[in-house]
Amino acid sequence: MSDKTEPNRRLVLGAGTAILAAASTNLAQAETSKPAVVSPLIATGSSALFPVAETTNGKVRGLDVGGIKQFKGIPYGASTEGRNRFMPPKKPAPWAGIRDCYDYGQTSPQVPQDSRIDYIRLIDFDLQPGGMGEDCLHLNVHTPAVNDGRKRPVMVSFHGGGFYQGSNNHNAYYGDPLARFGDVVVVTPNHRLGSLGYLHLADLGVPAEFKFAGVAGIMDLVAVLQWVRDNAESFGGDPNTVMIWGQSGGGFKTSTILGTPTAKGLFHRAAIQSGSTLKVRARDAATIHADMMLKKLRISLKNIGTLQKISWEQIIDAQAAVSLADPNTANFFPVLDGTIIPQHPFDPAAPSVSADVPIIISSALEDAALFLTNFNLDEAGLKGIAEKLFPTRGESIVALYRQHYPDKSPYLVQAMILTDSQWRRAVVRQAERKHALGAAPAYVYCWEWPTPAFNGKFGAVHAVDVPTAFHSSRGTMHGERPDAQKMADRHAAAWVVFARTGNPNAAGNPQWDPYTPETRATMVFADDTRVESDHRGDFRKLWDDINPPLNQGQG
């Protein structure tokens, strides 16, 4: 064994000895029926292995893992069950002593994912530790140090899964690699999802106390940022240097928070990965979905209080059933309520409330492969799909893609067509509207490095750039490949310097200029990472000419 590995071996053996000693002590105590004796150090304070930080609600104890302090399941809000259901988030009750934060808190109730689906296995989205429940307003912190007076950037990640599924307990959002790589504080919160976070009751004639039910999940995210403002310094962070970001549903949330006045001043940079959201849900559509839910639950307006008495299982069961009638109800969306969300986030213009916040906006080359399972699609089938979706233009659409991508499988060409007509167009609109404000810049990237998993059949699919933002290449998506780690180095370097300065130009990466309608500078993350002007401009012009409706909230 080499000298380099010997210290780790001694550490493991030492830990094993400690565990055996503790087990022997516990056995002896059990045999004599004597109460366990807790070390005064652990009971009252901090140690090198068990760091303690002070929050506004009480002290929390975490665990040092190779130099990174991790705190899991810190409450930033009270339980949302019972009378707190559909209400704005409330602060957690203060606690005495020290609260152990060694494991994840609950995830918001949701319909679980089916692991038989290849894409679900690709991103391990069926693996969501922590259990489900309404006591879900918790967050996780990974930091290089506590109580050291340093002013590190704080990077707050909103998880993916639309507005109706997922959690930051998922291993894709593990903050350790990024905190270690960038000397930053990483915060990953959970919050209310689905109908529990976005059931718009206000226009059904219910009591005024329910008026925020359609935006409660967004109010949770604002509460997260308020917690960061009040507690960042205890975890070695700077409350005046806060970056928010997310992919897919996390991008939806980031887009929405950029237009939320109550979040103003609580963050200073933002990044949106494959989640550009121009509009939230209109009140009339949201009211229809709320009415469908009440009918399914057999709750009338006269006994609306029953909504806070039934189990969350009944609510999620009804949500799942109603979604079969109208798929839009499955992805309950924040509502244009006029107060918390006074205007659509990026329609008809970028939000002035966050004009001074620089942003990064992106998509992946084959984002839409997320939804597609026809892996054996042939050329004739590809042309048939294109003609069905875009009558009279299908043949010319496929011809243009084949001109540029002669070797791509029909499945991946199909994915690019759907991605470019939706995700990429939303990226361009969002960037153009941000630029039009004439304040802080927008930076745009396209992720083209494909996942090697499943023999590469998914290409550069939705979520391929989630691990790399966390400086991680482990797991099914990337498989610990050297080229994957190279992409993680490039991506995380841009993320960290952007969090610190508001400019994503990192040493070793190409010069990345802001996006303007004149140059359309785009970072292309690929084996040959580069910056191009008007990247894939032929396809941008094609879809501007066809101009299909932009569907919000897909992902």
Image (tube, rainbow, N blue to C red):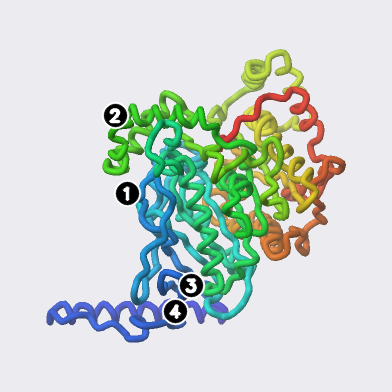
Disc 3 to disc 1, how far (Cα)?
A: 39 Å
Judge by depth and name the residue closer to the eye, 267 or 36.
Answer: 267
Residue type for callout 4: Leu
Q: Quadrant of the C terminus?
A: top right
Camera-side mark, 2 or 4: 2
Residue under the image location 39 percent in, 54 percent down: 136
Q: Which mark is residue 65?
A: 3
Q: Earlier in the sequence, mark 2 or mark 3?
A: 3
Residue under the image location 51 percent in, 58 percent down: 224
Q: Earlier in the sequence, mark 3 or mark 1?
A: 3
On the question of residue 503 being in view, the answer is: yes
Q: Secondary structure at mark 1?
A: helix
Disc 2 to disc 4, how far (Cα)?
A: 53 Å
Q: Are marks 4 and 3 in contact (CB under 8 Å)?
A: no
Count of marks placed on residues? 4
- Quarter of image, res 73: bottom left
Q: Position of residue 540 (x, y in %)?
A: 77, 32
Tell me the residue that label 1 is attached to: 83
Q: Earlier in the sequence, mark 4 or mark 3?
A: 4
Residue type for callout 1: Arg
Q: Secondary structure at mark 4?
A: loop
Tell me the residue that label 2 is attached to: 298
Q: Which mark is residue 49?
A: 4
